[in-house]
Every structure is written in structure tokens, then in C-alpha cells.
Image: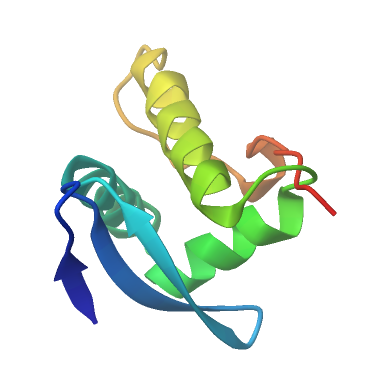
Amino acid sequence: MRLTGKNGLVLKNVTVLGRRTSLRLEPMMWRGLNEICEREGLALNEVCNLVEGRRVQSSLTAAIRVFTLSYFRTAAQEKRGWKPIPASQYPTISKNK
């Protein structure tokens, strides 16, 4: 599903750890997330699973935004172009309980 609301956020359904949920992100965030998937050879659901498995306090949507920003900040620091970033180096994001 892809719906754009009045606020410009795009709603998409994803499956995270076996359950279906929806994420509302800015179009540029979706483009960045899709680029990460392409570069890393992972499906969107796989990236969402990695983020979900590492977040501690925050919503999944906020954790996805932080992950996307962190990914590109790390990649921008690479001296020899893009390299895959091992999942062990993905940031841990807190989640509320």
C-alpha cells in the first residue's frame, strides 16, 4: 500500500518480525531506505527487521529515520566509495515500552 497524506508522508505496509505494520515516512526517506536496500542486497522487510531488532526506545518509524541518516553519514565518511556496512555496526535505537 502507498498513500500520501496531506502532510506529505507516504504510508507503506511492511512485515516486521512476522507481523504486518505500516510506516509513514517522507518520500526522500523512502528513497534513501530503498537505496540502502539496493546497495546492501536486502529486501525492505529485512532492513526493517534489522532496525527493529536493535531499537531500544523509540517508535519503529523514528528508528528507521535514524538508521537511514546514520547509514548515509557512515557511508559519506568512507574514503574509497561505498562499502556494505555490517549489521553489527548498525546503531542501536531505544524504543519505548
At 57% from the left and 44% from the top, the residue drawn is 63
Residue 33: image location, x then y, percent: 33, 50
Along the horizontal axis of the image, is 77 left or right of 53? left
Asked if residue 89 is positioned above or below residue 61 in the image, the reply reads above
* Of residues 16 and 84, the one drawn nearer to the viewer in this rendering: 16
| Residue at (40% x, 17% y) in the render | 78
* In front of the other: 41 or 52: 52
Name the quadrant containing residue 37: bottom left
Comparing 27 with 43, the one in front is 27
* Total numbered labels placed on residues in the image: 0
Is residue 42 visible in the rendered structure shown here? no
| Identity of the residue furthest to the front in this view | 6
Locate residue 38: give its quadrant: bottom left
From where the camera sits, is residue 29 visible?
yes
Horizontal and vertical percent position of residue 93: 70, 38
Residue 67 placed where, x, y %?
Answer: 51, 39
Split into 4 quadrants, where in the image is the C terminus?
bottom right
Quadrant location of the N terminus?
Answer: bottom left
Residue 31 image point, x, y percent: 20, 49
Where 47 sits versus 46, above or below?
Answer: above
Question: How is the protein colored in the picture?
Answer: rainbow
Side of 26 relative to 91 (left or right): left
